[in-house]
Amino acid sequence: MTILVAPESAATPSQPRTQQRNYLTDGYSVRSWLLTTDHKRIAILYLLSITFFFLLGGAAVIVVRLDLMTPQADLVQSETYNKLFTAHGVIMVFFFLIPSIPAVLGNFLVPLMVGARDLAFPRLNLLSWYVYMLGELFTLYALLAGGVDTGWTFYAPYSSTYSNTYVMATAVGIFITGFSSILTGLNFIVTIHKMRAPGLTWFRLPLFIWALYATSIIMVLGTPVLAITLLLVGMERLLGIGIFDPRLGGDPILFQHLFWFYSHPAVYIMILPSMGVVSEIIPCYCRKRPFGYAFIGFSSVAIAVFSFLVWGHHLFVSGQSIYAGMVFSMLSYLVAIPSAVKVFNWTASLHKGSISFDTPMLYALGFVGLFTMGGLTGLFVAALAVDVHVHDTYFIVAHFHYIMVGGAVMGYLGGIHFWWPKMTGRIYPEGWARLSAILIFVGFNLTFFPQYILGYLGMPRRYHVYPPEFQVLNVMSSAGASILGMGYFFPLTYLSWSLYFGKRASPNPWRATGLEWQTSSPPPTENFSETPVVLDEAYDYHRFDSLAATEGGGK
Amino acid sequence: MIGETPTPTVSALAHQFDDLTQQNEADDLGMWLFLSTELMFFGGLFLAYTVYRRQDEATFAAASQELDLFWGTLNTAILLTSSLTVALATHAAESRQRQQLIGLLTATIGLGSLFVSIKFMEYHQKYVHGLMPLGGLPFHWDGPSPAHAALFFDLYFLMTGVHALHMLIGLVILLVLLVKAIRGGLLGDHAAPVRVTGLYWHFVDVVWVFLFPMLYLIGAR
Amino acid sequence: MIDDGFRLLPEQASTLAPHVDLLYYFLLGVALFFTVLITVLIIYFSIKYRRGNTRVDRSSRPGHSTLLEIIWMVVPLIFSMGIFGWGATLYFSEYRPPAGAMEIRTVAKQWMWKFQHPNGHREINTLHIPLGQPIKMIMISEDVIHSLYVPAFRVKRDVLPGSYSSCWFEATRTGDFHLFCAEYCGTNHSRMIGRVIVMEPAEYEDWLGGGSAKETPVAAGQRLFEELRCVTCHRPDGATGRCPPLAGLLGREVKLTGGATIIADENYLRESILRPAAKVVEGFQPLMPSYDGQVDEEQLIQLISYIKSLAKP
């Protein structure tokens, strides 16, 4: 993407101006942050809130992994253990992973990438953060008041009738938070449709935008179904209506259908934005256009559409009709195709590139590897007969952590590093960042690979005590988790450090294409001094580099 | 969407948009997307209804006969009329007819309030007749499957309750619009809030158009 | 005793296990192939096209190739459809018990398993079964959802409150095997475990014979049938005219009022006892009162066993 201003020449004159006036220096009062409608400031608010919740969810699972070092219950009681893994799941899924990339990087980047001054509905955007915080408060209350022990899946009738914990407050919290995700998705779709800069056609859009567009569709259409499901669970607890309780004539399988109708697509809310991030990083560090741009873009939309058709693969052993099982199994294989298309295209993008291994690229390559493994084990669990064996075992736990942590979190961290200079105006220390990227990759595999074996051996998930023969693999997993935990701790430290001591960033430190790099770092409140006009294809690194070369080499 | 348009003293154009056409299109698209969310929200309830009606159609039909067809039909007529008045209000706002706008908004609010009042009166009737199986209230059913009949009434209260909640939210928004209209706002370029609220109001009407036959008309009378 | 040494694959102890494992090996092969392919390509490209390497040819970079895209869409599609067919065929046989399987009635509750053998013998958390005999589990839960899981048999099935579910297996090795609850069911979920003990058929008969004489589920069902006065309308000769005949009912197609038809399975019988008006047989009036609350899950299973035992006259 080339705009009227030549890429690097804009850097030097804008340097002093950057330090004078940008979105961060535009008001220092608490009020200027809490009442801001600037999408970039809202992104920072989200960044702080989800980091807090990431630490909280991580703390819960430290205890879980420690307890699983031995087959007996020696660290906590079973009741506490159940509350801890529920807290881990609820927090990580609803309060960290789902908002992670869309609400932080998406909020920050969508207007910048489409060349707009803000999202279409800035006040709605601020409202979405407040709604998220309100939901957070309810859930925190539930956790502090005594916890919930239903698992993040809230299966009825356990959640609706039998569990004596704070299910109501948690359900209300998730219900409310859902609206924040709906508002974010709605805002993105309208912005992408209506507010693109002149010349920015659909096929010139960055692939990150394609991915977020697909994500937003799921957010807008899927989240309300979770909302109504939780409302029904709440009504069942509060008023004793019998929608899911068989004693009152209800059907607990209906809950599972409704729950997974949202919660399966929700997995794609987590992974699609990461795919978008990787599609930005790989071209930049290969200095070339990604292979098969259109196929990567359309596969995002295909994944979003298929994601609504496969929920029944969570019910293969639940008693749904075996014919329904067969249909859902087949549809689940169809969703594998667009995912495979992406992996092949990313790999092919490396061909004839000029590859450098900066931190974001390490995360992106790690993502491709781990996502491949997570995706391929998806073939196992979509195969009906194998799923009957591994359903609700550690095989599933490993599979979805490979997607949600190996995939989504790697992409999130890669994106945070890639756009850190843009967001903060500072460069992070490269050596530390590479070290922690490698630590996370190694620690992740040590943690979760043994769980595949555990699962096929038959260890059910959510087990507090387990037969002694599973101990060796559990100890391996816990050991890996300590490395993984350390890997996550490093970025937290050096990124905070870089805010004060990091080198100041030029507008375009990675020499990347894309409109967000054409404005100063950090951007001014109104994003661009004048509306950019797009004349070229996305990721035209060839032209970008030759232009820079003729102007005396791009620093 | 509603809140995005500033008060009439400033320009109708918000800073993030280039021109009014873009802003109006964005407002409309935003509301349509919100309605698609709403559709999926009600969809979950419709699914539950379909599942349980299929399980025991006779009991659902018998339970349906306990609903008051007169009030249900009257409410349908009231709601459809309010859709007309809100559509005319949009027209009045866009063609800058302030008095008409105020009158039509008032009419819509009046009709909407009437609908909700009748709904609550029906709820009260059900309570009196012991047909409100909520929160441990007594439930009297002489037919063969009391548990399934209770499910029908659970769904009745849930679906019409969620619908009535949407009506109440709509009424609050309409009241805000009425105040703005009385202060001379919402005319011409500033009409977007009336238009998108109208869209929302129509949607709530359409939901009722489905609820009415599903709940009131399935029993042969 | 349960083999608790370190291993990478669980024991194979049912007729199904080798089939599931074969598919698993195939999938491992597919996964390994693609993982290695992607990893090797990434490493190869990363080294060859690293930024420092200026001698490599980077001219005429292809931007896309429709042919390649089609290849890597169609090849995985063919692979995955094959896997789908394979998995589905196995799944089909997994949940369709062969005729003449021995039925074991199972009631699950927080946090225990209750089993009853065809001769009426009951046991808790331990299940003795004979080698080489197909076993059909008919299961129901008294409270929340549980899931019966025997890893060595590669069999799992959720146990639901309110309706029966079933699965079957045929053991091929004697020994002790784990039995887990796989669906999270509350505080002591991880302690809702038991053992399956597979015995030689003769040994099993000896084991069954031990202890006092028991009432079989069918006999208990018949006793209940009389105690609850079912028999006043549902006469053994089926000749009262007030109700459809019960003899030979199970597994038969039944025409309902309103024109629909339904296969009379255990869940239909259960529903008809608890909510008689829900699915009335064509030509009859909904006269029967509900027995909801008068019979518990175990009694329901006994009543249904008795009705099942009524052969067509």
Image (cartoon, coloured by chain):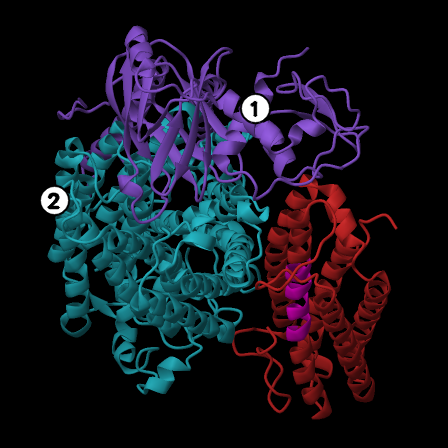
Prevailing secondary structure class for the magenta stretch in the rendered image: helix
Q: Please name the color used to draw chain A.
A: cyan
Instruction: Report helix, strand or loop for mark 1.
Output: helix
Up/down of A183 relative to A162, above or below: below
Instruction: Give the residue number, with chain letter if any, for mark 2.
Output: A479
Q: Please name the color used to draw chain C.
A: purple
Q: Nearer the viewer, residue B71 or A543?
A: B71
Dot label at residue C256: none
- Which residue occupies 49% across, 30% down? C165
**Which quadrant would residue A459 be assigned to in this image?**
top left
Residues behind callouts 1 and 2 on a single chain: no
Residue B36 can be seen in this image: yes
Instruction: Report helix, strand or loop for mark 2.
Output: helix
Horizontal and vertical percent position of residue A49: 32, 68
Q: In the picture provided, is A295 more to the left or to the right than A553?
A: right
Q: Which chain is red?
A: B
Callout 2 amino acid: Ala
The range drawn in magenta is B156-169
Dot label at residue C222: 1
Horizontal and vertical percent position of residue A476: 13, 39
